[in-house]
Amino acid sequence: MSLTSQEANAQGLAALRNRDLAKAQRCFEQAVALDPSAGSLWRNLAHARRLAGDESGERVALEGALGIDARDLAALVRLAQWFERAGDRREAMLRWSGVIQLGEQIASPSEELAGLLAHARDYCAQQGAALATPIRQALAPRYDDFGQTGRRRAQAFIEHSLGTRRIYPNVCAGIHYPFLPADEFFDDHHFPWFADLAARTDAIRAELQALIADPGADLIPYVRMEKGVSGSQWDPLNHNLDWGACFLWEYGRPNTPVLDRCPNTAAALAALPGARIPGRAPSAFFSMLKPHTRIPPHTGVTNTRAIVHLPLIVPPGCGFRVGGETREWVVGQPFAFDDTIEHEAWNNSDELRAVLIFDVWNPHLSPEEQAIVADYCAMVDELSSSPVVG
């Protein structure tokens, strides 16, 4: 009487318990032949072959399991271990990277899996560090000659592949426009008006300094959470002028007293091709960060916009990170970034840091797409404010 795959598997497990490795292999091979689509049978065969010292046979069986399901985490772990034992660093790193990718999707990993993930990260980090220096030395001169876009992407590719740089996704608290590039900093060529803005730096800074000397009620805390809301990373900055703001525009509404005091800044903003969405955009403000103050990592509202910084007062010891790239502000050199990618800022100096910040359209949106976004927002706001019928 012929056996079923389950019966052959059961006999193989019994043979393993009795340390009869030859029989165990025969039984698991029979089980696999009867049901080649069962990954668990392939894994059992791989285990028996490993115990028997058949290294090449173990690898074939593990690859059989992964051929059925490339997300078979148990088989992937064991294949990563196989390549690590064999001293094949490249293949081991690839498999351990796959283990990390799958393991991070498990909300509450077991203690055993947590240990395996820790080993995978350590192994990839160690091997990446050993490979990094010769790879950087060989390839960096190549992409140094690329344009701004190609250079940033090539460098990020190398560092991510070496395991030294994380790639950050868009995290939108509000509107998310699909399929836009999730780039940390936008390249300057998207903003041909940067040169004109930079040329106005001295005049804008003079108006800011006059505001700082006599801010009156125009300087307010940037973080203003509702009363009773606490327990977040924003508590130290909540209603605190350590991070202060003088708004020229806020959610599409002009702040006339500040605009009147800053005619050069107002004219510079008026000349820009910014978004105009009533009740939403533009926003523009002088951002003041007091000495030894840090803005914690956070993400913004929508990837339909780009946030522009024009540095005005920048003492040494200040920095700004978006995703995996950190920059220093340089007075008079504007840049733009996607604030739906995690970012943070700090002022480690003993002096005030001040930047003009405003939003414009994400440069990857066509004019037609900009109109769709603006019309959608207008309709949502209108319908939301209408009385409910029924």
Image: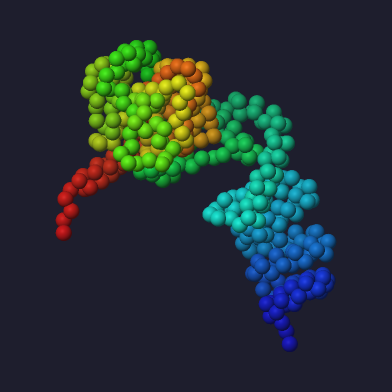
Q: Nearer the viewer, residue 198 or 76?
A: 76
Q: Does any portion of residue 189 appear in the rendered image?
A: no
The quarter of the rendered structure image containing the N terminus is: bottom right
Numbered-mark total: 0
The quarter of the rendered structure image containing the C terminus is: bottom left
Q: Image point 82% across, 70% down: which residue? A: 19
Residue 191, above or below 204 = below
The x and y percentages for residue 245 are: 34, 25
Q: Image point 63% across, 40% down: which residue? A: 163
Extreme residue in the front direction: 228
Q: Is residue 376 left or right of residue 15?
A: left
The x and y percentages for residue 224 are: 33, 34
Residue 73, above or below 269 = below
Q: Image point 21% across, 48% down: which residue? A: 383
Q: Image point 67% across, 59% down: which residue? A: 75
Residue 198, above or below 226 = above
Q: Nearer the viewer, residue 290 or 202?
A: 290
Residue 17, above or below 302 = below
The x and y percentages for residue 13 are: 74, 73
Q: Does any portion of residue 13 appear in the rendered image?
A: yes
The x and y percentages for residue 289 are: 41, 23
Q: Quadrant of residue 31?
A: bottom right
Q: Is residue 261 left or right of residue 295?
A: left
Extreme residue in the bottom direction: 1
Q: Quadrant of residue 198?
A: top left
Q: How is the image coloured?
A: rainbow
